[in-house]
Amino acid sequence: MIQIIDRRFDSKNRSSVNRTRFLRRFRGQIKQAVSDILDHGGIKDMDSGKKIRIPGRDIAEPQFGHGPGGRRERVHAGNDRFGTGDEVERPPAGGQGGQGGRASPDGEGEDAFEFAISRDEFLDFFFEELALPNLVKRHLASLTEFRNVRAGHTHTGVPTNLNLVRTMRGATGRRIATRGPFADRRRELEEALAEARRLHGEDSPEVRGLLAELDRLGRRLAAVPFIDTYDLRFNNRVRVAQPTTQAVMFCLMDVSGSMDEAKKNISKRFFTLLYLFLKRNYERIEVVFIRHHTSAEEVDEERFFHSRETGGTIVSSALRLMRDIAAERFPPGLWNLYGAQASDGDNWSDDSEPSRDLLAESILPQVQHFAYIEIADSPQVLWREYETLLPGHPETFAMRRIREVTDIYPVFHDLFRKRV
């Protein structure tokens, strides 16, 4: 009998395998349910799981069964009303105890199946169809890393790579193969020696000759080495080239006085979503946080999302700082550069035109993609200046407007959807 023991790591969640199979099977329905949730939900829904509702008809499985009518014999549990041989009428269809059920709220006449997905599962579905635009166009082929992978065994190598199991197995096989003929010969000589002693005595020439030959054979057997250099086996590793890409995302957030708490809240939610997306989908990506009012400053994640510093508005200071940081630490020849700027579009009176020129001449020619998010109900002065750049940079520049919190998800999906 073959006994199969499943030792795959399953933590404490013993139903995870069935759960993964279920999610894979009903992927289409779940993605549609996640999309519906995002259209009517808030960003706080990202922090916890969410209940998914799938119509009952979508999870029904086809199966064979007996059709209505015909003669069937069954054994049912008895009670005090019926005895052996009594005939029981078939209950009417649709009545109590028959088939049917409660209608679902949408009036489709089928019960819906509702279950909860975890935060990680929710994010997997949410970010599944998103990607950084143009990520692989420049550097995938030019930047190469190597990693060592196992490639069998060799007869040469350094002591640290010695494979003891393979070595001892080879040595044992060699000793058995080499000593085999000598062992058979020694066994024959020992039998002949016993016969000679019985027939001719201990001091006979035949006995002395057999003893001498056994002595020579013993020395030859002892000369077979326990481990020969031929037995050594070393783990072999080869370097395999792996093309990689590296990218940096510049997050530019306007924290000037014209950005009230509601607008700052929308900006932070957008950048939170962007940061979550980058860290979840890419292993090697740098994120540079830049806050600006009249002056720009590179800050860490904590200060970017929680600092309360404010002031006037000079957008060019943030663009200029992004340009300088990219030139100093992230040369465009080696890095994929991305930028995302969030602002209410209100700028210093004579700074919008220099900001547009700075973006057009110093930033857009070097980045893979730059997205400008304006948090306002109508186009502001910065929007009108940036708008002139769209015809000349259709692939690398995008502008979107967010009016309220519910616009964050559609805008984010539109900016970072996978492009064919």
Image (cartoon, helix red, strand yellow):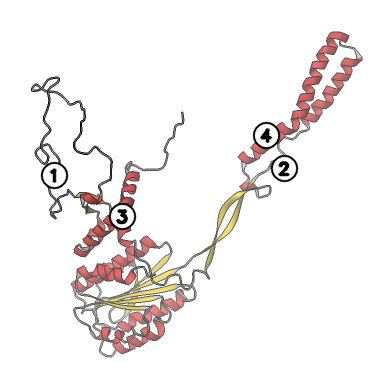
Residue at figure coordinates x 24%, y 69% from the top left = 408
In the rendered view, does 174 fall on the left or right side of 129? right
Q: Residue, x 32% and y 72% (percent of image)?
A: 415
- SS class, disc 4: helix
Name the residue that disc number 1 marks: 101
Residue tagged by mark 4? 172
Q: Which mark is residue 27?
A: 3
Q: Residues within 10 Å of mark 4 (few under 14, many from 20)?
A: some
Front position in the image: 261 or 134: 134
Residue 274 pos. (x, y %): 32, 67
Q: Read off the residue under disc 2.
A: 230
- Number of numbered tags placed on the structure image: 4
Instruction: Give whichever of 87, 277 is nearer the camera.
Output: 87
User: Which amino acid, mark 2?
Assistant: Tyr
Q: Which quadrant holds residue 372?
A: bottom left
Question: Which callout, 3 or 2, points at the residue further toward the start of the chain?
Answer: 3
Would you place residue 137 above or below residue 27 in this image?
below
Nearer the N terminus, badge 1 or badge 3? Answer: 3
Residue 305 percent location from the top left of the image:
28, 68
| First in residue order: circle 2 vs circle 4 | 4
Mark 2 surroundings within 10 Å by alpha-carbon count, few (fewer than 14), some (14 through 19), many (20 or more): few
